[in-house]
Structure formats: C-alpha cells, structure tokens
Amino acid sequence: MAKKAKPAGEKPVEALSLKEAKAEHVRLELQIEQHDRRYYQQDKPTISDADYDALRRRYEAIELAFPDLRTLTSLSHKVGAAPSGKFKKVRHAVPMLSLGNAFSAEDVTDFVERVRRFLRLSEKDDLVITAEPKIDGLSCSIRYEQGKLAVAATRGDGAEGEDVTANIRTIKDIPHELKGKGVPDVFEARGEVYMTKEDFLALNKRQEQEGKALYVNPRNTAAGSLRQIDPNMTAQRPLKFFAYTWGEASHPPADTQSESVAMMKRWGLPVNALMVKCRSVEELLAHYRKIESERAKLPYDIDGVVYKVDRLDWQERLGFVSRSPRWAIAHKFAAEKATTIVKAIEIQVGRTGKLTPVAKLEPVTVGGVVVQNATLHNEDEIERLGVRVGDTVTIQRAGDVIPQVLGVVEDKPRGKKQYECPKTCPICGSHAVREDGEVDRRCTGGLVCPAQEVQTLIHFVSRNAFDIDGLGEKQIEFFFEKGWVRQPADIFTLEKRNGKIKLENEEGFGATSVRNLFDAINVRRKIAFNRVLFALGIRHIGETNATRLARHYGTMEALREAALASGAGDADALAEMNNVNGIGEIVAEAVVEFFKEKKNMKALDALLAEIEIEPMEAVAKDSAVSGKTVVFTGALEQMTRDEAKAMAERLGAKVAGSVSKKTDYVVAGPGAGSKLKEAQKHGVAVLSEDDWFKLIGKK
Ligand code: IVH
C-alpha cells in the first residue's frame, strides 16, 4: 500500500504551536460531535466515512503530540478504545457465498430435480431437504478457536469482510465460549444478525420522542448498528443472531444439516426453531406456505424460505456454481407492490450500447425502500404494457432486483401521448438499430459513444471487478466529464496528474478524501487475473467465464496470444478456447473480437503498464490433477458428468470438451467412442473411473 501523504493545506501536527493545537483540538471536537449526532442519531451523515475517519485521526494525532489536551471530556475517552477509524479487513478462510433464488413452485421442482440428477438418485432414493426461514438481516461469520470467540466478520464481498469482533461481543445472544461435547478446535459459526420488529419499533418510538429521524426498517438498522465504529453504540442497539451454517471447521458438527444445527444449539449458539425436514417438493411447498402465513406474526422480518440438502456428504458432492451452492436455494416470497405515476420515460445506454427505457416515477415507498425509477426493459415491453407518460402504474420490487413496471392502472387518468422509442442514441446521436429477431435496440456509436465508455469504466471499478473504495458511478461520471478519466489506465495515473488537476479543490473532494482515493486506487495495483478479465467488460464475460478463462490460461499474455492466434485462423487455438469448460463458440468469438480490436489493445497495454496481475491460482494447487487438462467421455457410472466436471475443477484441473494433444487425461466410461480414439491417436493417458478416483486420492 502506498504511504499516506499529508493532505495538502494541513500543517503537520509536529509543526503546530500549543495555541494552534488547542484551537484545532476544540474545532475538531465540535465537528466530530456534530457528525456523530448526524450519523448515529439522525442516520443522515453529511460526510463520507473516510472523511470522518480522517477527522478522528487528526484529533488523535494532536492528543498524542499534546497529551495535556487529553482531558476527561475528550472524545477519546467517550469511545473506550480509540477507534481505529475503519474496520480491519478479515479474509474468510472459506468464502461466504450467497444463495440462488426460486420464485415459484416450478423453480422449486427444478431445484429438486437438478439435485437428484446431479447425484444420480433414483426415484426410490430418499432425498431429505431442510426448510427454514430466510432471515432478513446481514450475514456474519463468528470464529471460535478452542471454543473461545476469536474473530467476527461481516460478509463483505464474500472473500473479505470487516472485522466486527468488538461489536459482535456486545450481542447478548452470542456466546463468548462454546460449551459441551465435540466443540471443534476451530469453528466458524455463520448466520444472520437481525433486529426484532418489536425492538425496531421501540427504537423508533424513542427516536420520535426525542425528535430524531426515524430508521427505515429493521434490516438496515441492524446493518448500521453492527457497523458502528464505537462498540458502545452497538451495545445500545438490541441485536440478535441465528446460526444456520458454518465456514472453516476442524470437523463438521455432524453428518447432516439438521443434526449440525441441533449440535450448534447444544454448543450454545442461537438457532431458528422453524426448521423442518422434508422428503418431497409437496412437503417443501407446504412448509413454505405455513411460514408465509405466519410471517406477519413472527417477531423478526423474513423474506423467504431456504431449502438445503440435508446430507453433508451430498452437499460436498454438489458443491458450488459461481457464488451459490448447488445444494441450497432461497424460495422468495412474492414481491411487494405499489402504485405511482410515471413522470417521464428516459433512455439509459448501457456498456454494450443497449438502450433501456426507464420509467421515472413519482417517489413511492415499496417494502421500506423509496423507489423513483423502474425498468421498462425494451420497446416491446412498453408496447405490451401500453404505458404512457402520465399513467398510473403498478410497480414491484423483489429483494435487490431493479423495480419493474407490472401494468397500467386503467381506471386512473391516462397519459395522452403514446411513447415512441428514439431511433438515435440520446447520448452520442448515432443510429440506434434493432436487428432482426432482437428485442433490444443498440447504439451503433461503439467506441465514440461516451455512455458506453462511461458504463465500461463504471463496470471496471464495480464490486466484483476492481472494487475501488470511493470510486463509484458518480465519481467516474464526474471524472469522465472533466476529461480526466477516459480509459481504465487513467484511473491509475490520476495521482501523478493531480498536480495539474487539483482534485482537492473540487466540491465534495477534501484533501483527505483525495488522499484516501489515491490510496484505494494504489491498493488495487496488484489484482487477481480473473477480476481484471471480468473488469474489461468483454461481451459474455461475466464472473464465471472470466474465472474459467483465467484458470485455463493463467496469465493475460497467454490468453492474448491464444485469442490473437485464434483470430488469425489457428484452428487448434480456437478449438482449445471453445473447449474450456462452459466457454463455447459465442463466448470464444467475443474474446477473439475483443483482442483483435486495436483500440482495446492500446487501452489494455496502458492498463498493464500500471498494474500487476496476480496469475490465477488453481483451486487446489497440490492435487494430482491441478493444472492438467481432463476430458470425460462415455457413460460414467459412479458420478454424473456435471459432478465429474465440478470435482475436477475443484481440484484445479481444466475440463475440456474434446481431446487434443494438450489433453493430459481422458476419463472414459463404457461406450466411449471417438474421443477415446482421439486419445489413443495423441497418446493421451486413458483412465477408467476407478483410476480417476485413485489418481485424486479418493480410493
Ligand atoms: S444459508 C452458502 N440460511 O441469505 C450460503 N442463508 O440470499 C449459505 N440468509 O448470504 C447461506 N437466512 O445472508 C442461509 N436460513 C438461512 C438464511 C440465509 C438468511 C441469508 C444469508 C445469505 C443470503 C442469500
């Protein structure tokens, strides 16, 4: 990380006279107290966390240099331990993932069938699935070492969260020590921190009586409470916890999900009492309906029911896809709805040039959140809905999904003019065309369309890409408009150019926040290959495909070489890319197109001059098949094809769809045909399923 420089315009603490220090100490104290009130009590902070932290750091530095100023009334006493200003980061030993969603009975049936297929269960085989409420709080991982609470962390981006140990310790529900038989040496209890409806209402009543701003909903209040810098503040908020799974554990609590939860309860962790074991889709749906009918009476907010395969050995076989387990799913309750008026219809231009009509709405609260925009998807949808500016419409919001317009309320006054989609891009004026068979209209401005450039940059810094603290949509738009950032590399040269730019003089950018921004940018100069690949915004390259390619090629140079060779007609190189598990022709073509474009290569090289890409680590570096290319063929008998692929990938192997001279192993079941012949032709090792299990140490 870059060294923190002194913000411009601030005298170093060592250079302050006692008189100056005293004056500044008082001024800072007043400022900090004012911001504390706005943040903690009014929930309306007027400065960024980073700027607040800077004030506190300066305040402490002054007290350190002038100890006499540290009187009993000093803020440093009020908060107990001097706040670090920020939470430390904690890397999760086992990633904290999220859940896939089911919205209908059909989705639930699909889930159960998928699981059965993957495990190759026959109709006679019993498949037990647990069903329990989905708590609307925030997930947290609490690590016990030798039974003692050691570290607690928020989920963060799943790989790394924030250290909230001190705050978690103030939650009465959570034991500081696990008791009873069989407590593992290391056990990370994972679950949901939440606030009961009753406590939330009482808190708001107090706020009201004191003439303070009201909190929006229990979930946000719980989240805000857990992320208080001062644990004393958290202690005053009545938070609770339900444990429902675990992360790293020296041994699992039991053999099944349900017994594991029972075991966690025995060790002293609070668990939800509404979990049942089901043996069919009908039983799952019956429990779903039961919980839904009790929802309003439950003491805490829930937003669905979570189903989990009960047997842990089956959970392990099922594994994960992208960020969610194959062995669990969240069956969400129906979305909340509201009606409001369409004030305007605007067109947004996305990263790929897609024009999306968006309804600008009279603000309305849906499920505790104020909604002002709702997507209309495309022009066919506008026509289907018959929506016009001035209409009253029904909208719905489900979880984090973008609010949608469901339909026009016919018996309310109607808008007069039928809406017509523009045929040119509202941003760059280029033709916007809708190709045959396509529902979307796209701007043809490509590289000259600022909207696409801006959206590409916004994507570049987004959470699962470069994830730069303090550099979001607003800042990117502002920097772009000013001409300071036009391509990704410019982000990394901003600091060097700041002598001219003088960002600290712009509204909303104090000297400290500029410093923090540059620090946050510098932190990302070293970054994993899959993130960079995802960040580039290549068509069809989402997180999963980025990771597949990154794992297969290992470095940007290898990928570029393969793409350029493919583009130049090297059939082997193209076949190899097509064959990377899950990639296929369309995606491979998009990658080749991206690398063929000179402008892209110029931008990429400029970026590479600024950053260091960490080569992609295979999932398991030390497995016998890590880094090897494997092809499965024929009828596998001990595992399904999906399971075989997932297992190989978990062990760090690359799974390909066809055999070439680069293949290391062909695992062949009965009936293997042409691939087996290809293997023999290239002298590739052919394994039976048993050989495969021996090779990976499972037999
Ligand atoms: S199990 C591998 N069970 O919902 C993920 N999650 O939408 C295992 N959540 O990130 C999660 N109640 O924060 C699980 N009973 C429950 C839950 C639950 C709430 C949250 C959790 C998760 C999110 C996914």
Image (tube, rainbow, N blue to C red):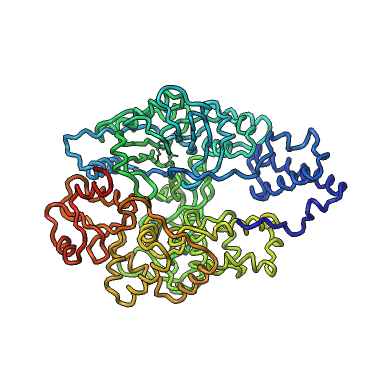
In the figure, residue 75 lies in which quadrant?
top right
Left or right, 257 with respect to 463, comes to left
Q: Position of residue 13 (x, y in %)?
A: 79, 51
Q: Residue at x 55, y 33 (%)?
A: 168
Left or right, 632 with respect to 176, comes to left
Q: In the image shown, does 588 or 94 lie closer to the viewer?
A: 94
Give the residue at the far left of this rendering.
671
Left or right, 122 with respect to 507, comes to left
Residue 9 visible? The answer is: yes
Q: In the image shown, does 33 or 399 lie closer to the viewer?
A: 33
Q: Residue at x 37, y 68 (%)?
A: 591
Q: Position of residue 564 (x, y in %)?
A: 37, 74
Q: In the image shown, does 565 or 395 lie closer to the viewer?
A: 565
Q: Residue at x 45, y 51 (%)?
A: 402
Left or right, 183 with respect to 49, comes to left
Residue 379 visible? The answer is: no
Is residue 412 depicted above or below 241 in this figure? below
Is residue 638 depicted above or below 454 in this figure? above
In the figure, residue 94 lies in which quadrant?
top left
Task: Locate the N terminus by quadrant.
Answer: bottom right
Is residue 110 depicted above or below 281 in this figure? below
Q: In the image shown, does 311 or 510 lie closer to the viewer?
A: 311
Picture quadrant of ligand 1:
top left
Task: Locate the C terminus by quadrant.
Answer: top left
Q: Position of residue 230 (x, y in %)?
A: 64, 36
